[in-house]
Image (cartoon, rainbow, N blue to C red):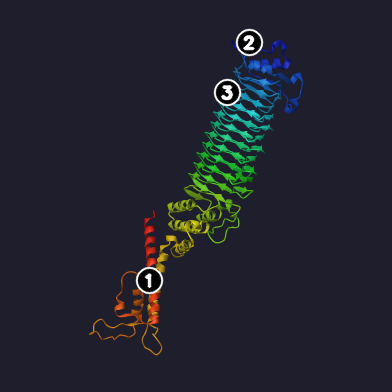
Amino acid sequence: MDQERIPPRLPVDKLTELERTVLDAARLGEPAGLLDRRVDVEELAVTDDPGLCVRAELIRDLLLGRHGELDPRGVLIAGVRVLGLLDLDRVTAVTGLALVGSALPDGFTCRHASLPELALDESLVSGVFAVGLLIEGGLFLRGAVVRSDGEAGGVRLSGAHIGGAAVFDGGELVNSSGPALSAEHLRTEGSLFLCATVARGNGEAGAVRLHSAHIGGQAVFDGAGLVNDSGPALNAEYLRTDGSLSLRTTVARGNGKWGAVRLHSARIGGQAVFDGAGLVNDSGPALNAEYLRTDGSLSLCTHVDDDGHRRNAVMRGRGDAGAVSLHSAHIGGQAVFEEAVIADSGDGPLIVLAEAQVDGLLFLPATVVCPQGRVEAGGRSCVASASRTVVVRGLVFPRLGGVSWREWLHLLVHHTPEYLPQPYQQLAAVERAAGHEGNARQVLIVQQEDLRRRAPEALGGRLARLRYRLWGWLGRYGYRAHRLVLALAAVLALAGGTGYTAGQITTGPGTDHHTAERVRPPLPADTTIPAGTPCSTVELIGLGIDRGLPLGVTGVRARCDLDTSTTAGQVFTIVLWVLQALLWALATLTVAAYTSLIRKPA
């Protein structure tokens, strides 16, 4: 049956004076109600004054068109108490509804309804139940107070579709038994605003629940206060926004392993901004943004208001997940932690960046993790290393900002929970890409030292670890090959010095023969220098080098050699054998080191 043919539940002759005024105003598109003075909505909620009360049935009749044609500007009522539950379930309204500064103590339900627009600005409502609501324009609850006691939520917008913006600025949403705002699978064509909104909820669903919501513009929580003592303050898992997400100066206090603010697998079409925000969770992460993806930057910076007051971003959490967890996140712009104050009240990491990818600058000042901003990469442990750690396993970034490579190296050595090679390789790649090859080599040297210190079992037994330690001392693990060349030259000099020393020692008391001296000439005719004659200084040095060289000979031994029939000669021969073995080893390591350097990409 056509709605126009259905008689209203409240005929005109049964309307109060105020209700007739509302009817006439709706036909003219004018506001009705208490317009000339303001009454506190708390007082309206308990008043019985007929001059301040409008029955819910009249509003339903008006929106169904049962009182005839209404002005397209909608039903506009201000400063009244709505008597009874305002039931608009499955109503297809002929015009919009605005209840401003009014009280709806019995609640408001519009499940699966269709309205051109809905506004409850500055009104007091005991629950807004709008599952599946379709609004062509915007939804406005600016300055509204919603108090409820239900597990499903104080404001229930699950599956709703808003054709414009959804605005809750300055509102107070309270629910002692569930979410203050439950809007999973909500879709808006415009932005979502909860600026300066206070939302107090209860339970694991979150004080504000935006699970799988799709916001066609921005999601803005600037200056909001979100509280939940038994779950997340903001649960936005799988949230999708076409614009930015902003929580500037937002205060969010949550509880539990899901985080105070939960953005697991959220997709942000612009920036994610937490400047000046304060997120607190004493039993889990302050910010849980695992698998977050942003097309723009991530910012946890200081906020400066119009009066010049500065407010740092403060994140305090607890547990192994970290105070700020960005595990496997993908930041399409910069990741900026300038002057952020991050703390874990237990023994967990401050920031988890495992498997994260930052496409722009990673701006993480060293003092965010290490208050002293130290640059030492070895020696004693940093005094803050046990309680202030960062997890960077698999982190990829093109450039560092706010931290020198030495400070970042200090963080890798002293402020990571375990040795891992990839973070060092990443830092070395960044330095190499910037043309700082020497810095890259130093990073890789420190990597090997950290391996030897924190994961010695990976090197093998005690002998293997000792050999690796020697390799590090001699050639800096192949990254300082010139040290091997110097060591090779030193051993050669020692071999020459050994030959010279042998020429100064006699074979025994009362004899003129020396441990190293002229040998018998190979041809009887060559008698110009008889055997037993002392060798010259050059010949003695050449003798040591000749016996020490692993390959090639100088020919000196044909004229001057050790007398191995004596004890001293045998001792010097053994010494030179040892030096020859060292030269073999050093020569091999030098060739290997230089070959490795040649193969490294520039």
Report the residue that reaches farthest toward the bottom.
510
Q: Earlier in the sequence, mark 1 or mark 2?
A: 2
**Rendered residue at 63%/10% (across/down):** 6
The Cα atoms of the two marked residues, 1 and 2, are separated by 112 Å
Residue 6 badge: 2
Q: Is the residue marked by circle 3 packed among few (<14), some (14-19), or many (20+) residues within 10 Å?
A: many
Residue linked to disc 1: 580
Asked whether 23 or 530 is in front, the reply is: 530
- Please, what secondary structure does the residue beneath circle 3 have? strand
**In the structure shown, which secondary structural element does the residue marked by tag 2 occupy?**
loop
Amino acid type, callout 2: Ile
Asked if residue 432 is positioned above or below residue 583 in the image, the reply reads above
What x and y, as percent, mark residue 127? 67, 27
Of marks 3 and 1, which one's residue comes earlier in the chain? 3
Disc 3 or 2, which lies upstream in sequence?
2
Residue at image x 37%, y 62%? 591
